Amino acid sequence: MSMNSLPDVTSTPLTTAWREPAARVAHAEEVLAGLPPRRERPPEQQARLDAAVEDARLARSGFLAEHAQAVYDALTDGSTVHLWLDELVRAAAGMFPGLVPTDAQMSRERALVQEEKEGREIDQAIFFSAVLRQPRAGAHLLESLLRPRPQALDLLAEFTARGAVDLGPLTVERVGEAAYVTVTNPGSLNAEDDDLIAAMDVAVDLALLDDKVKVGVLRGGEMTHPKYRGRRVFSAGINLVHLSQGRISYVDFLLRRELGYISKIQHGLLPPPGQLGWRARTVQKPWIAAVDTFAIGGGMQLLFVFDRVIAASDSFFSLPAAQEGIIPGAGNLRLPRIAGNRVARQVILSGRRIKATDPDARLICDEVVDPADMDAAVRAAVAELAAPAVVANRAMLNLAEEPPEVFRAYMAEFALQQGLRLYAKDVMDKTTKFGART
């Protein structure tokens, strides 16, 4: 069933219930339409708009608190249609006008730097948080996002035949029983942006779908940055230049990375119907992270879902999201379990940097080796993790450590709070200062 064939609910009790909240949303839009761009507004005009927007958001959140499951059922034909994040908000904008921004409204937002946006992504955050809070709707959405991306299915025959594919920000190459995913954003020190997240989604799909691949390996490529020229770098975290320019998407970056490829690494990929049989619901494989130089921010977050982390002795880990003003993905959920409460608070709240040679580094990584020995250590880990029983055991470990309901509940709160953080004044101030230096 396609989105074009979704049922017409223009006169149902549900859309009738939306009528009064929709009027409050329409009032906020009317106020906004009569104002100049944000940078030209005097304080009294901004205050009037803020009051109207706050009332509109109260209307949205109140409606969804009561009707989120019914809304999701209407959008997905009773959870029989699997929609991606962008498809779901697009369907919601069409079926319940004003509940979430339209494509046209988001297009205008994307043309602005972060400090000049109206914060429409907060309205998306209200919607996704409400959906994820519903046990049935949230579980169905999380499952929907474990499906392979269409681009991966289109590239699968080429990858299985050639053993290699170039996705722009990264490459995927099959060597023996391993798929090596190498991030190649050298000018930005392998910082994460919307394009890299989309490419990672496809790369992880290919590694999981190729029957010849037994183990996935993630590593950073060599840099062109003057300070690190010729050296491999794992990840510099979120691309702060793109953040200041308004090019970091709430849906296609902040939500998609957590609910898309990272979830697939940890929980597996849900293949097309009929391709897996009855023995397992998802395709799962062990993953190795090879950390050269540093794993900062989102790079360190990734390590928490990998089965083996190998770090060069001259590398370090840090999670400066609190200093940047945002929430470090699911790091707050996973790091306390991995490293303990005290270390987690030092890293997340105070920005503590952990060197690979520090004693606490052994809580983050499994092996610390000389940089010259990284290749050999990765090959040895691949041989070990390719053992047949590894897949079943790592799946059971992940299930015990992070049950699906725990992850869903965390992501429901994360979805809202990260949307709010993206437009918080302290974040705006930091992105403005950072943008001025670039």
Image (spheres, helix red, strand yellow):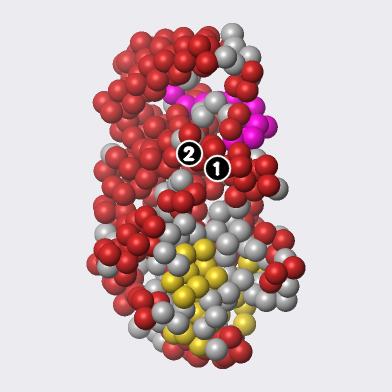
Task: Name the residue: 44% across, 88% down.
Answer: 384
**In magenta segment, residue 103:** yes
Between the C-alphas of marks 1 and 2, the distance is 6 Å
How far across and down, in percent of the image, does residue 151 sit? 63, 55
**Circles 1 and 2: CB distance less than 8 Å?**
yes
Tell whether 238 sits left or right of 145.
Answer: right
Q: In this orientation, does residue 283 appear?
A: no
Disc on res. 430: 1
Number of marks drawn: 2
> Label 2 belongs to which residue?
426
The answer to whether residue 175 is left or right of residue 276 is right
Q: Is residue 297 above or below residue 44?
A: below
- Where is residue 212? Give x, y as percent: 55, 78
The residue segment tinted magenta is: 99-114
Say if 81 sits above or below 198 in the image. Answer: above
At 59% across and 16% down in the image, what residue appears? 41
Task: Classify residue 170 by image quadrant.
Answer: bottom right
Residue 347: x and y in percent read 39, 62
In this view of the protein, can residue 316 be seen by the observer?
A: yes
Q: Is residue 145 above or below residue 271?
A: above
Percent position of residue 177, x then y: 55, 83
Q: Quadrant of residue 149?
A: bottom right
Q: What's under tag 1, amino acid-wise?
A: Lys
Secondary structure under badge 2? helix
Q: Nearer the viewer, residue 154 or 99?
A: 99
On whether residue 148 falls in the magenta region, the answer is no
Q: Measured along the vertical axis of the image, is residue 62 above or below residue 339?
A: above
Query: Residue visible at 26% across and 63% down?
Result: 341
User: Element at badge 1?
Assistant: helix
Q: Residues within 10 Å of mark 1 (few under 14, many from 20)?
A: some
Q: Say which of 263 and 183 sits in front.
A: 183
